[in-house]
Every structure is written in C-alpha cells, then in structure tokens.
Amino acid sequence: MTFQEIILSLQNYWAKQNCIIAQPYDVEKGAGTMSPYTFLKALGPEPWRIAYVEPSRRPADARYGENPNRVYQHHQYQVILKPSPDNVQDLYLGSLMALGIDPKKHDIRFVEDNWEAPTLGAWGLGWEVWLDGMEITQFTYFQQIGGFDCELESAELTYGLERIAMYIQEKDNVFDIEWVDGVTYGDFFKMAEWEHSKYSFELADTKLLFSFFDSYEAEAKRIIEEGLILPAYDYVLKCSHTFNILDARGAISVTERTGFISRVRNLARMVAQAYLKQREAMGYPLLKK
Amino acid sequence: MAKDLVFEIGTEEIPAKFMNRTLEQLKENATRVFLENRIGYDSLETYGTPRRLVLYVKDMAEKQEDLETEVKGPSKKAAYDNDSNPTKALLGFLKGNGLDIKDIYIKELSGAEYIYGKKHLKGMDTKEVLKVLLPSILVSISFPKSMKWGNKSFRFARPVRWLMPIFGDELVEFNKDDIRCSKYTKGHRVLSEGDIEITNASEYFDKMRKAYVIVDQNERREIIKKQCEEIAKEKNGKIIHDDDLLEEIVYLVEYPTALLGSFEEDYLKLPKEVIITPMKEHQRYFPVEDEKGNLMSNFITIRNGDDSYIDIVRQGNEKVLRARLSDAKFFYEEDKKVPLDQCVEKLKSVVFQETLGTIYDKTVNIINNSIYIAQELGLEEKEVEELKRAAYLAKADLVTNMVKEFDELQGIMGREYALVQGESPEVAKAIEEHYMPRNAGDDMPSSLYGAIVGMADRIDTITGCFSIGIQPTGSQDPYALRRQAISIINIILEKKIHLDIKKLVQKAITPFVEKGIIKEEPFKVIDDVIDFFKQRLKNVLLDRNYEYDVIDSVLNVGLTDIEDAMLRVKELSQWKNQVDFLAIASSFNRVSNLASKAETMEIDSILLSEQAEKELFDSYMNVKNIFNEAMDKKEYHDALKALMLMKRPIDNFFDNTMVMVEDQSIRRNRLAMLKTIENMMMRFADLSLIVVNK
C-alpha cells in the first residue's frame, strides 16, 4: 500500500462514517489540532464530524533529511467526532482494517497518554494506540480548548501517517516510503527537509522574526476587537509558527519561553471566547440539523 | 437463601496505574454501603482488567436484615394528662412511628423521664435495594484524573460503555445516564466477537475465560510470571524482576501471552541502564539476564491475546526496540564527545525555577553548601577538592541528549560520561548517588560525597522555595519538598552525621538573601524551614515505631542536630520501657508546672531556709556537673541517669515545701530554682510531655 493509498483508504473510510473530508488548512501549523476545523469547531454545543490530512511543521524536529525517523514536516491524519460516539474505539479499529491491519494478527493496545497543548490552552485524556509496541495514533477526548470547558466532548484521532506507512511498507527510513509507485517520500521531500532545516537552524533572521511575532500578535488583537474570528486566528497560527522557528533557532532563552507561550495562549483564548459568543449569537446553526 | 452478585462496569481502557487503588476503593465503598444497608454476604472481592471493574459478592442475602431502632418520644409529663390518659403528643408519636401503646416504655434521660419505643423496619428485597445502591457505588469511585464524555452526569477515568449487574440469575435493572445496563458483557476486544450473555452470576468467570478474558488480576499476574520464567529458561536466562512494571502489565492485558524477542548483541556494549530504560519505561518489556547477571540481547513482552500470529507481533516489537536502541546509541556516542565542563556552561540557559534562576545558579549553591558541610564534618582539603568537582558536575548531564530523552537516566549518565572523560571513580559515583534515595524504597547513597552533594542540593531547593513562598500546603507540593527533607533526614540518620541543621539552613539561605529575592525576614524563613524539618523528622521517627510522646518531648526543646535528636529519642524510649517512668515523669511534670511562673533564674542561696529546698539545691548543683558533662560527650544514658538522681529530692521538696508562699522574695527564689532545674532538663528533653500508659 503506497503512502497515497493509505491516505485514500482513510479518506474513504471516514467519508463513510459521515465525516466531512476537508483539505489541509493553508496556514503553517505544528499539528492537525491547530486547524480551525478542530480548534474552533471543538468548542460549543454543536455537533461536528470532519477528517483531513494536515501537514504539520515542527522546526525543532528538523534533521536536514538525515535522521530516519525525524522530519521538519510530517503528515497527520486528523479525525474529529463530536460528540464522541459510544463505539468510537470500534470505529477506529475499523479504520485500521481499512488499512489492511487486522487487529487479530497484531497486538493493539490503548496505553494511557494525556494530551496537553499549552499554547492552545487545551488538554484532554486518552491513549496512544500501540501496534505491536509502536505508537501509531493519538486518541484524545478533549476536555478543554482555549481555556474553555468542552460543552460537547469530541474524540480526536490523530494518525501518524509516516509511522503507519513505514510499518505497512516495512521501511526503516522515512525517506524510503513509497509515496506512489516509483516516487519515494525522499524524492518528494528530502530537499525540502534540508532547506527548512538549514533555514530554521542557521539562516532564520531572528530580529525580523521577533518583529513578525509582535506584529502578528498586534494584528490578531486588533482584528478580534473587530469581531472577526478566522482572520484573527490565522495570525495566532502565524505567531505560533514564528515562535517555533525562533525556538528551534535557539533565539528564545528558557526564561523568555514561558512568556511567549502564554502570549500565544492568551490570543488563542481570546479567539475561542469570541467564537463561542459568535455561535451563540447565531443560534448555533449546526444544532438545528 | 443467598445468591451471588456480579456487577461489571465495562469501560474503555483505564490507565493501568490507577487500577490497584481503584479496585481497593470499589471494595471499600461497596463494603461500607452494604453494611449501612444491612445486606449480609459471605465474601466480597473486586477484580479488574483494562476494560472492566468487577464487584463480586458471594452468597449475598436476598433480603436486607430487619432493623429495630429505638425512638425517643415526648417526656412522660407531656405524654399523659392528669388522669393518666395519653395526650395528643403521645398519640402523635405513636402514629408517626407506627407504634402501639403497649410497645412503649419509659427511660430516664438527664434527670427527666421520657417515652421510648422500638420501631421495626422490615428488610426489603436485596434486588430492589441494589437498584439504588449499585449506581451510587459506581459514581462513588474517584480517580487522580477523570474526564467527562457524552453529557453524562458523572466523571470517570475513561468512558463507561456498559453495566452488567446480575444478582443470582436476575438483572438488577436501573438506568444510569442511559448507559447500557443488561445481562450482556463483552469479551476480549479482538479474540471474542459480539456480546456475551451471563445468565447467572456464578458462571461469570468461566464464561469470561472462554471469551479470552482472565478477570482475576492475581491469576493474570501468576500467568505472566510463570510464562516469563519458562521462556527465559529456554534461553538459559531469567527476567530482571520489577514489581511496578509487572503490576502495570497486569492491567494492560486481559489475556496475557508472553513472547521472547531479541536485538543485536552489539547494543550490549552500551551502559546497562541505557538499554533497560527504553525497554521498561517506553515499551514495557522485561529485560533478560544470564545466570551471572549479565544482560542478554533478549526481551520479553506480554501480548494482549493468544499466540496466533505471534511471529508478526514479535517482529513488530523487535523493530520498535531496534529503532529505540539505535537512537540511544546515537545519543550516547554524541554525548560522550561533549566535555562535561561544556555541559555545565549550558546549564546557564536551563531554568530551575523562574525566580530562583537557572540550574547553573543552583550548581553554584550546591558547591557552596557542599563545601560548608564538608568543613563541618572535618573533611581534608584534598577531599574537599574532589567533592567540589562532584558538586560542580552533578547536574551536567541534564543537557545531554540521553537525559533529555530519558529523564530517569539523570545521574546515571552523569556517572558514565564522567568515567569516560577521565573523572575519578569517586566523583563519578557521587554524581550518580546525589539523587539517592530517588524514591521511598530506594537505596541510600553509599559514598559520603554522594550523601553530601545530595544534601547540599536538597537543602538548596528547600530553602530556595521557602524563601520565595513556595511551601507545601495540603496535597500541594510541586517541588516534592517533603520528600527532599525526608531524604536529608534519612541520609543523616543512615550515615550518623552530626550537623547543625539550623546553621546549614542559615548558610543555604544566604544566596537568596543576597539576591534580594527572599520574600520575608530571613529569620522567619529559617524558623519555618526548621519547623518543616521538625515535622518531617517526627514522621520519620513515628515510621520507625518510636512513640509520639517521646518524640515530642525531645523535639519540643528545639532542633539543631538531627542525629543527636535521634540518639536522645532512642535513649529515652529505652528508659521509658525499663524503669518506673511514671513517677519520674510526674516529678518533672510538677517542676515544669510551677517553673512557668518563674520570673528569674537567679537563685539566692541565702534565702534557702527549709531542709528540703536546701537538699534540692545541693542535688541540683551536684547533678548539673555530671549531667552537662555527659551531654557534652553525647553520653545520653549517663545524662538521663544523672537526672534520675533528682527524683527523690524533687518529690521531697514538693511534699515538704510550700512554693507559693506570701513572702515574695522566698517565692521568687523557689520558682527560680525550679526554672533552673527545668532548664537543665530541657537540654535533653521536655520530660513533662512523657505520657505513661499502662
């Protein structure tokens, strides 16, 4: 099964489970949770089901394309089921079957793992799912987002696509994964990995990036005052990514670190609050369906 | 007639580390609830797997016991009128409690007579009562961390998906938040399909076994142990036991099957801990060793299932471990190249605590505290130099790749890298041991350097946190200050170190005073820290089975030298059990009672007029010298023996002399003498606090 077929299988499977199949959100982010399709939609009482691939950038994990397991950008397959259905674990195991992973032939475990994202003011309880000892999915019941209790709890499934592909294709190196027949993951991304590593660790203009951070923050605040949620949230994401590059570059001292994190969290909280208010004012349109 | 009750709470995978406590709680709560509701039974047990909590009660009575309670009515006066006819008050009482007039009787209560009656409450059917009790037991379970899901009215560790309460062969039907409540359960997630009907409680365990669920955790534990032994033996090895790991695995699987995997022998060149840690902490594997105790290139993992397709599972696990070991090897090789001195420099950018500063700042404090302790203990200059080196390098490994990846390897990697880079074995050992004891059951540091650096580190954390107002309150103790203080105490007692704790605290607190970050007056903080140590020492001594009054009497006179306090507690405990201590303690008690009234401690010998007081004074002058000399030499047996000499003169004094006389100067003088005697005694302990029980 190629990387592409893995994605297509998951898309088909979750489409049949009445999920919206969305496209990746077009602002840089470190995880699928940060997409507004998750971060905002998990708030409030309205039901929601969505699935999408999310390219996730983690500058600190960049390794110039030389490490067999770590990359600047990996791909998450993200599923949100809100409210979490009673058979959510069975639905998940069904998705593994769709990938040709028969639970009878393996050892699949749900091992306690509690998820927390300090920049988002979010946390949840759940597991990491093990396939024969390897973590392949993060499974979380959201409890708080943007500092607000989740009124209607969502289940979030985050598949690590590279891990799963390496397992299915029996590869020891992420760059050997076959994206499609004849094209490897390395062909597709190795150069990008090197360039982003070089940029994040060596070339990023920290002075400029610090000023970006300040500007993005100010713009997010200004826009939120105007009552526009999504444009403001885009700047929150930009703040977060800028912070991640600066962090990878070693430009943020440990003392400053907490300060930056709380600045991003503060913005995320403001956006979450505005979104909740907006949906309430709109009369929760998705509730009526 | 009695029937068995099985109550299964079907859940999604509950964190393994919660399970033991949860099952205890379920047992305690159910026992209490059944007792309160007068439901008898033969035995009550709780069982659990990752997906179910089970309450099993054998031979439970089908009815609650009847209840007879005494109810109090109106006073006799109010119950009958002048013609001895029942009043409205009495009739109302009878009616309200369903009593007949011939059932009542009269009892006296604080001088007045009242009407009483015995009220009978018929026991209800157990099955009906369980419909209320079982849901209340369900929601009474609490967890260290719990969650909400699906708009349920209660929280649980993970979602509850079904309930199966069966009493005999009947369903105890109730509705709790629309969670499925039926005679159906589920078997092993993969090996069993569909729902399983339990028609009678007594067939529960057998039916579950057929559905690949071993419900009894004790049975699973034995199976795991036996299988591990067997397959390790095939390789002529044995597993390295780890009870915590075993306990966790017991609650990660419903149907255990052990399998043996292997990895490349080349990795065995790495330090043992570097191989074992990823195996145990990340993968929950048991390491295997040969008869000589050498680590083998094998591991044992417990699959949740049977042995079908077990080779696929083995290969998968081997692949994961290989990747982890290759990471570890890479980290180890990279780390070795970086001089530890360079690592210490990097500590300047690692924050220990926002106000207290970086780990580098902490390192400086550890060095200074270590030097201070070394000088107090009279270490030689050469030794102090070596100790300084160990203190300087103690935290260096925190910035190595290996410790960043596996923080439980802190200290151990420091030792390894120190040895590789040519530090002395003593320094390397001290780096590792300064973290010991790592937890309650852990070994003490074997080396004096390790002990000193460890104390220096902990006293820095404690005084630092107290200085900026982070003190443990209730269950809040984010820096584990209690544990750190207990570690210092245990190290002192184990190594029999005589150290003035007050002076140590004064020394340790100086950097925070100098930096101006201390929030209160230094003397106040020092007092708080000493009180904190006193409380911890008290707990440590109680744990060692010393009696609380003996501990109090010693600690109440102040705490300076912990080891010394321990010696006095020991000595006093022996005396307390040997001689007729009641008389002696009460003699000193009489002294203390009056001594508190004294205004001065100046005794004017000319004012001593009566025989008994002269004798007491002579006795004091005599005992004082012997006592103080013994105290100075820490010969506590002799010191107490000397004090005992004063018993007869004290008793004599009180029997024959009036202290609170009219004459002010004589009264003052007698009180002063008592105060002086008390003061002497207080060097050892406040004997008036000794409680003598038969």
Image (tube, helix red, strand yellow):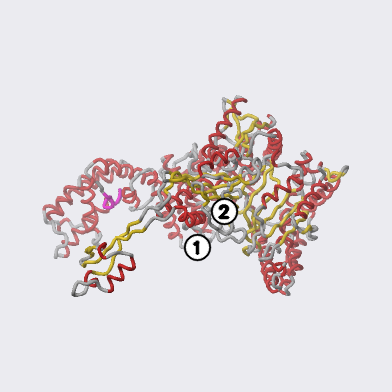
Examine the residues drawn in magenta and state their main secondary structure: loop
Where is residue A210 shown, x and y percent of the image? 74, 62
Query: Is B243 drawn above or below residue A123 in the view shown?
Result: above
Name the residue carrying label 1.
Answer: B519
Task: Please report whichever mark, 1 or 2, sits nearer to the chain's N-terminal start.
Answer: 2
Circles 1 and 2, Cβ within 8 Å, touching? The answer is no
Query: Is A182 drawn above or below residue A152 in the view shown?
Result: above
Name the residue carrying label 2.
Answer: B181
Is B684 colored magenta in this rendering?
Answer: yes
Using residue B540 as the reference point, say whether residue B106 is left or right of it. Answer: left
Is B167 colored magenta in this rendering?
Answer: no
| Residue A275 falls in image quadrant | bottom right
Which segment did they paint magenta? B683-691
Instruction: Give the numbered dot on residue B680.
Output: none
* Residue B97 at least partly seen: yes
Where is residue B473 shown, x and y percent of the image? 47, 58
Pick whichever, B415 or A159, lies toward us. A159
Mark 1 or mark 2: which is in front?
Answer: 2
Pick whichever, B606 or A22, lies toward us. A22
Helix, strand, or loop for circle 2?
A: strand
Using residue B340 as the reference point, say whether residue B502 is left or right of it. Answer: left
